[in-house]
Image (cartoon, rainbow, N blue to C red):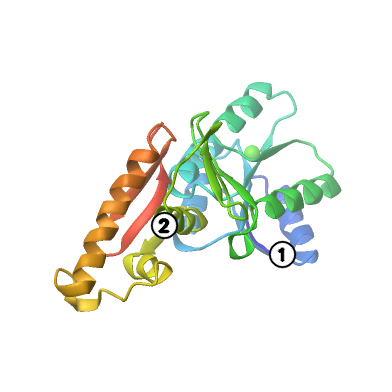
Amino acid sequence: MSSLLIVEDDELLRDGLSAQLSQVGHAVTAAADGEAAQRLLEANRYDGVVLDLGLPKISGMDVLRWIRRRLPALPVLILTARDGVDDRVHGLNAGADDYLTKPFDMAELQARLGAMLRRARLPAFGGSLEVPSNTTRRLRVDATLPQAWLGDEALELTQREWALLSLLVTHAGRVVSREDVLETWQIGDPGDSAGSGAAGVASNALEVYIHRLRRKLADSGLNIRNVRGLGYMLETTQP
Ligand code: CA
């Protein structure tokens, strides 16, 4: 079961989509405009989004760009008008994972949605994943090798850098706490003693690794943001 957000202003289509996707076992939330969609995305975690492009208040394209900045790894399938070739192209360029042209067949929607969710699913971070961004030098990681690439270029990473990057990628768009990183590195929790002793050293080391990783991710369209007091978050840079 996946948790899905359906964003569609056409009430009939919205209800139809919600009913059909609930029936096959998904947990479905529906929004009727772009503003409501952004509010829901800020407050909840979803596995995938079905996004109509023609929406009131905030357009689907703007919602898509917003999602790509905030939640780089969230799979998005866009719905476009039959003759909206430009919409499709723009939508895919803006980071949509797939699209369907209206009117569409419900079985096709389910098949495409299923494929999209399977591609995005990362049980214990297995398999290969590409992080969407507004550049051709996209970050791709394969946990089984393990190896990461920017575009066609393999990234040279130390074991710790790899562990840090894996953690950030699997939580893309969400905050990874310093404690989570140190735990992955199997270094003690810095707790309240950050800045002194072994914990302080670990904390400082983390800063160094974040800095190195940022440099290695230059031109990837991705940034590691320092979320004050909370940790770090992998996000796409502004286009
Ligand atoms: Ca519409």
- The image quarter containing residue 89 is top right
Lower sequence index among marks 1 and 2: 1
The number of numbered badges drawn on the structure is: 2
Residue at the (59%, 60%) spot, across then down = 125
Residue type indicated by callout 1: His
Residue type indicated by callout 2: Leu
- Give the left or right position of residue 41, taking residue 223 as reference: right
Q: Could you tell me residue 61's position as x and y percent? A: 54, 35
Q: Is residue 87 visible?
A: yes
- Give the left or right position of residue 151, taking residue 200 as reference: right
Residue where numbered disc 1 is placed? 26
Q: Quadrant of the C terminus?
A: top left
Residue at the (51%, 45%) spot, across then down = 34
Residue at the (47%, 48%) spot, across then down = 35
CB of mark 1 within 8 Å of CB of mark 2? no
Q: Quadrant of the N terminus?
A: bottom right
Residue where numbered disc 2 is placed? 164
Q: Could you tell me residue 226's position as x and y percent? A: 29, 53
